[in-house]
Image: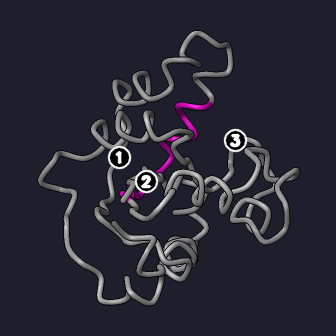
Amino acid sequence: MEKTLVLLKPSCVQRQLIGEVVNRFERRGLRIAGMKMMQLSDDILREHYAHLADKPFFPTLAASMQASPVIALALEGIDAVQVVRAMTGATNGRAAAPGTIRGDYSMSNQQNIVHASDSPENALIELARFFRPEEIFEYESGAKAYIYGADECK
């Protein structure tokens, strides 16, 4: 099973959408392997957004991500990265399709509710950035047999 990182951004936390967004991931069949609330530091933001740290808008982005705590989620499922990315929708909420998380809850490119890892390789890096190994749990979901076909789980 593949794991991926999702951050519920301050726009999600402040708008009290945490339960609704987590519910959507669980109802889809993704398993929560880790979950915690945290306040992001300057250091973790510079590392996480290293590709944007030299951009003129980075201070605004960092301030936005530090406006309140975030919820870090480690989600697991077959093709979890691809499934989560499809569920979150386009980065700009105004361009995101209705039915996606951003399409349903965002009108912004920056205040866009969630961050989701963009590849399995980056998911591993990002999970290690936000979770210690002992904070990601391995357990068997009782619903697994009703989420996947027997031949899909190896």
Q: Which residue is mark 3?
A: 110
Q: Residues within 10 Å of mark 2 (few under 14, many from 20)?
A: many
Sequence-wise first label, 1 or 3: 1
Residue 102 coordinates in the image, percent (x, y) = 72, 59
Residue type, mark 1 in image? Gln
Residue 5 coordinates in the image, percent (x, y) = 43, 50
Task: Tell me: residue 141, above or below residue 134.
Answer: below
Q: Which residue is mark 1?
A: 39
Circles 1 and 2, Cβ within 8 Å, touching? The answer is: yes
Work out how far the residue at label 1 is from the one at label 2, CA to CA, in angstroms: 6 Å
Residue type, mark 3 in image? Gln
Q: Which residue is mark 2?
A: 70
Residue 72 coordinates in the image, percent (x, y) = 38, 55
**Which quarter of the rendered picture does the C terminus lie within?**
bottom left
Task: Tell me: residue 11, above or below residue 118.
Answer: below
Residue 28's mark? Answer: none
Give SS at disc 1. Answer: loop
Q: How is the image coloured?
A: one colour
Work out how far the residue at label 1 is from the one at label 3, CA to CA, in angstroms: 18 Å
Q: Which residues are magenta?
A: 61-74
Residue found 41% across the figure and 81% down from its top: 150
Sequence-wise first label, 1 or 2: 1
